[in-house]
Image (cartoon, grey):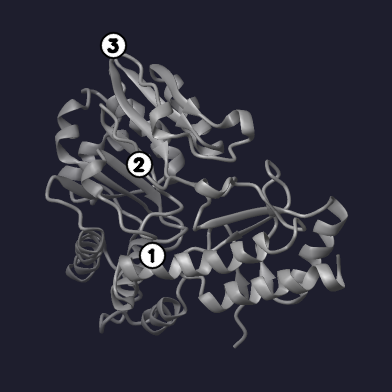
Amino acid sequence: MKRAYNFNAGPSALPLAVLQRAQQELLDFRGTGMSVMELSHRSKEYDEVHNRAKQLLKELMNIPDTHDVLFLQGGASLQFSMVPMNFLTDGRVGNYVLTGAWSEKALKEAKKVGETHIAASSKEENYAYIPANESIQLSEEAAYLHITSNNTIFGTQWNEFPDADTDLIADMSSDILSREIDVAKFALIYAGAQKNLGPSGVTVAIIRTDLLERIPENLPTMLDYRTYSTSNSLYNTPPTFAIYMLSLVLEWVKEQGGVGVIEKRNQEKAGVIYAAIDESDGFYAPHAKKDSRSLMNITFTLPNEEVTKRFLAEAKERGFVGLAGHRSVGGCRASVYNAVPLEACEALAQFMKEFPKYFG
């Protein structure tokens, strides 16, 4: 079986061992005679899957008892609306740090709900860096400070999270579980699963439970975090197969040795590709400034559009998938999420070293 070198930005690579386990259990899940997709979400068998996923996430991320884990749908894009609907109450201001397209979209949705304020931004340099923490200027009556921890399009990542004098909320869709963090620092973390947690279809929210007391009454039921917290995310039919896959990915992370081991591996993987960029005498130009570089999404440009097209065509011939950059940056992007093996990164780096000699 030949597997592609999968550098897709999302949905992205899943661990081979997880796919093989799902394949083994697809037709008969643990002696039920049914696929996990066919199980009732009220059944004992699915209940074990659901609660195991929650327990593993709490264990791997060291989530304190002050926080609850919710499984939702709609991706991070729905969270852009849910966050202000639940927490941007009258007289308060939603504060946003702009570091890319997704933070812009989050701000756009918040403006529909209430008053907002841009606390810091790197837009003037096409989001090539993360603003320094000391540059963040909160508004008066701040309801929360919203950040995007990793920016898939621009290849930047927060290395040090702000110590804000308000509740810190983070969209961690593209780097959750990729490094150790202090969850207690955050009032709310949310993430679409399709980068590091599993397949698309489920969104994880880690919420400090005292925030639930601030939610206004009369919100639509499915847009109210309390609905999911009080029902163990089982108010309606959850994305059961996606949660099952999430549980398998979490088992895999645990088997690897935990998030600390994954983080060191991610540093090594990214380092291999960044070295190929930095040692290319300018043939590959990084988009992100060095102190803001992402371990998940590595963005770079080539001398011109013609060379870029030749690079991508040759890369495809060699089995590399998903390397085209976003139109906002151009060039190329290698997304090296948890499930992308070191061997794939080494193969890409070797190709990058060879390309200027033979195809540049």
Q: Secondary structure at mark 1?
A: helix
Q: Amino acid at mark 2?
A: Phe
Frontmost residue, 228 versus 194: 194
Vertical placement of 45 versus 67: above or below?
Answer: below
At x 73% / y 77%, what residue is drawn? 318
Q: Quadrant of the N terminus?
A: bottom right
At x 85% / y 58%, what residue is drawn? 307
At x 50% / y 58%, what residue is drawn? 296
In the visual, does 253 lie left or right of 201?
Answer: left
Residue under circle 1?
263
Q: Secondary structure at mark 2?
A: loop
Q: Earlier in the sequence, mark 1 or mark 2?
A: 2
Residue under circle 3?
91
Q: Amino acid at mark 1?
A: Glu
Q: Position of residue 348 (x, y in %)?
A: 65, 72
Q: Nearer the viewer, mark 1 or mark 3?
A: 1
Q: Secondary structure at mark 3?
A: loop
Q: Position of residue 224 (x, y in %)?
A: 27, 34
Residue under circle 2?
161
